Image (cartoon, grey):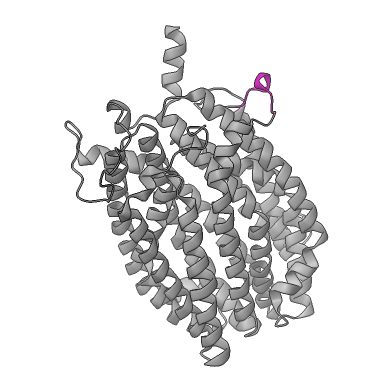
Amino acid sequence: MEQMERDEKKRIIRTTLDMLPDGKPPEEGEDIRIRKVTLPEGVKRGSLSGDVVRIAWPCLIELILTQLTSMVDQMMVGRLPGQEGIMALSAVGLAAQPKFLLMTLVIAMNVGSTAVIARYRGQRNQKKANQTYRQAILLNLLLSVVFMGVGILGAEPLIRFMGAGGITQETLRYGTEYLRIQMYGLIPLVLTVTTTAALRGVGDTRIPLLYNTVANVVNVIGNYLLIYGKGGFPAMGVAGASLATVIGQTVAFGMAAAVAFSKKRYIFLDFKEGFRFDPSIMRSVVAIGTPSMMEQLFLRLGAILYVRTVAGLGDTMYAAHNVLLSIMSMTFMIGQAFATSATTLMGQSLGKLRRDMAALYMKETRRLGLYVSCLMLVGMALFRVQIIGLYNSTPEVVEIGSQILFLLAFLQPVQTDQFIVSGGLRGAGDTRYTAAVIAVSVLFVRNVLGTLMVKLWHLGLWGAWIAMSGDQGVRALLILHRYYSGKWSLIRLKEEMG
């Protein structure tokens, strides 16, 4: 028994929360609004910062490396000779949105599994945490098989729809090739991100950093060999970039599977336990994941409508837009990394019934996120021309892209804080509200305002990105309002409610 306890301790990523006693549920009529929260006796702010950073830094590096790899994909295809580079950039951007749309349900269920696993980790219930992981694997495997078939058979119509009549036949062909190859690699990708979500639920972000770093290195090497035809390989262009990505994802899957079956972590898979559906656990995952699915659907639908609006401006403007989206996606990484800390620590705190610690962790995560986002602001503002030039040297792309990038620089603090607070709400299981916010901000603010500015007022690419800024601002205000209300602290798992 003592040996089993020692083995379990080795698998736990410990935090300050583990040293504190359990709390108690809020009493009826108690004021749950977030006001000034004091540190518990014996707890220092530095220890909370350490917990946040310990979870966030591997996640940040992982996300940055992944996004850098995506950026390298676009830089490499963007530097294909002449007009081919412009069309290739447009094709990769057009293929990204249908892939993300097909991944929507998987991403949503992973939000649910991370929140539920984090809650069980706070309750020190390793058995339930691992049962939740198995349910997530089973569900997402079935979903990935269905989505792979849809993506392979519907690749060309999806790219044609995304182009909104503003792309050439060559761009359509490139985009179709890229998307179809991506779909063949969907199953290993889905199973890998499911394992990553489970590990993040218990605060273990270093292992995903390892296997995703290896995958990214494989991807970049594959790009060099397959896009340009180096080392005896055929020059495949855009198709080569997509194939290199799939190869990298498959390598990551192999490493993630080895970790999952090794039983050396808090979260692991055991064939002896079987892979049958467990209705009680699935209810908790689906209850949190379904609103998140709606959020992702709103987000992707809004993104698709937005892309169609911009694609109508032609290949050159869409190429510049795609470069800006790639850079903006990189800036998302800061918010997403700290949001992972917020999700994990919020879920674990509520599992331990420590609402005070949930609020303290959120405060510390937001403070650290603000510091890092301000550094990003300065870097983007000072080196905006050089950053755009890394993607494409076409004068029109560099000029308009660098101008709009200056605007994006000043969005960083707002954007990062919104990511962090949203992550905390998801960790609490408060996914219905975040879904409603996305519906309002993306579908209405971004797209209605974007359509008016681009098509009615003829402000071109500038109009599209002013609308994007409005979306970010409205979203941040609504999310903060929900957080300070404290209503997230009353949410319980379906299984807890019977």
Q: Quadrant of residue 113?
A: top right
Marker count (numbered): 0
Whether residue 479 is in magenta: the answer is no
**In the depicted structure, whether residue 478 falls above or below residue 17:** below
- Locate residue 84, reporting x and y percent: 71, 76
Horizontal and vertical percent position of residue 14: 36, 29
Instruction: State left or right for residue 269 relative to residue 8.
Output: right
Q: Nearer the viewer, residue 398 or 130?
A: 130
Left or right of 129 in this view: 163 = right
**Farthest residue in the front direction?**
29
Q: Position of residue 237 (x, y in %)?
A: 73, 65
Q: Nearer the viewer, residue 488 or 206?
A: 488
Considering depth in this image, is 209 or 6 the residue closer to the camera?
6
Residue found at x 69% / y 60%: 241
Residue farthest bottom in this picture: 457
Q: Residue at x 59, y 82 (%)?
A: 317
Inspect this view and state whether residue 255 appears.
Answer: no
Residue drawn at x 53%, y 86% as measured from the top left: 452
* Residue drawn at (45%, 60%) of the image: 332
Q: Which residues are magenta?
A: 269-275
Q: Position of residue 313 (x, y in %)?
A: 62, 85
Left or right of residue 140: residue 415:
left
Based on the displayed image, in which of its 4 quarters is residue 27 positioned?
top left
Image height check: is 255 above or below 247? above
Q: Is residue 46 above or below residue 96?
A: above
Q: Is residue 101 visible?
A: yes
Question: Which part of the image, by quadrant, shows the N terminus?
Answer: top left
Q: Indicate yes or no whether the magenta region holds residue 270.
A: yes
